Amino acid sequence: MSGIKTTGEKKMMFFSGRAHPELAEEVAHQLGIGVVPTKAFDFANGEIYVRYQESARGADCFLIQSHTAPINKWIMEQLIMIDALKRASARSITVIVPFYGYARQDKKHRGREPISARLIADLLGAAGADRIVSVDLHTDQIVGFFDGPVDHLFALPILADYVGAKVDKDKLTVVSPDAGRVRVADRWCDRLGAPLAIVHKRRDKDVANQVTVHEVVGNVEGRVCVLVDDMIDTGGTICAAADALFAHGAEDVIVTATHGVLSGPAADRLKNSKVSEFVFTNTLPTPNELELDKITVLSIAPTIANAVREIFEDGSVTSLFEEQSGPA
């Protein structure tokens, strides 16, 4: 399939880095276009070489690269690919980052710390990106870090509809694993018509100020609880929250997250957890050791493809998510 799609005088080209080629192929298929052939390899010292096999002159170029492990390598490759497109006289460069690296470093908690999420946005812009598309950013403020359009996509419709189709909604309770996710959990409640509960973490001052106690706010006894989060990394926080729900009488717990980072001890924690199912999207590749029966991966490709189509046709990406995005 050709890597070029034309509409009138406009020309779309779709490119992918090497981090997650399976997702790139899915998005391209949804668009009815191929991924532009690209020669990319590492030199002996780790430097990255990229060259496109087709001309990008005058094209609206879309470049997808998810920031998976090894994260710094794939960010660098993406920057090099953007630079190559800029020097190839691309008409526009839209960078698709399904999982935005360094998103958790979005503010200074203490002195002498960086705001690395802002740095990533600056690097993408300096390389030549005109626009950024990402899915479920860790915090909404990251949208303001880039001096250009940022399209913030949401996986909530895909995840919530999957859960709603398999669980009796009369028994369902949506649970936020901490205070920071309450706004997202509220959107789930609106979509599923379910009540909300919150797992609140606090330090137990009676035990050397070290032990974390999980308090559950809301009724979860005898309920099927769906814990909603944007990402799961090592799995410690979400598994502890699930244990707290079971301790408060939950009948079952399902965990959903857009991004399955799943690093370090995540494999063992998910395997040993009492959680019946973990549901992710494929913004990141799932490690082979986590191909478990209790893990379900849903495709985010249709959502990304719809956004690309709207951008290319000068449509409205916001209109795709107005019901889920909430007030500005």
Image (cartoon, rainbow, N blue to C red):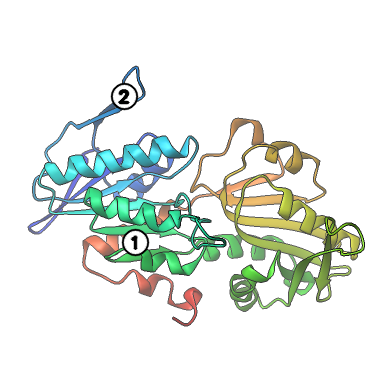
Q: How far across and down, in percent of the image, does residue 210 sit?
A: 83, 55
User: Neighbour class for label 2 at 10 Å: few (<14), some, many (≥20)?
Assistant: some
Sequence order check: which comes first, mark 2 or mark 1? Answer: 2
> Can you see residue 35?
no
Q: Quadrant of the C terminus?
A: bottom left
**Residue in view at x 64 percent, y 57 percent:** 256
Q: Position of residue 141 (x, y in %)?
A: 45, 69
The quadrant where residue 307 appears = bottom left
What residue is disc 2 on?
41
Using residue 179 as the reference point, say whether residue 144 is left or right of it. left
Nearest the eye: 217 or 185:
217
Residue 307 is labelled as 1
Q: Secondary structure at mark 2?
A: strand
In this view, the residue in front, 82 or 37, is 82
The residue shown at (32%, 42%) is 78
| Residue 130 visible in the picture | yes
- The answer to whether residue 87 is above or below residue 47 is below
Q: What amino acid is found at the position of numbered circle 1 in the picture?
A: Ala
Farthest residue toward the bottom?
327
**SS at mark 1 in the image:** helix
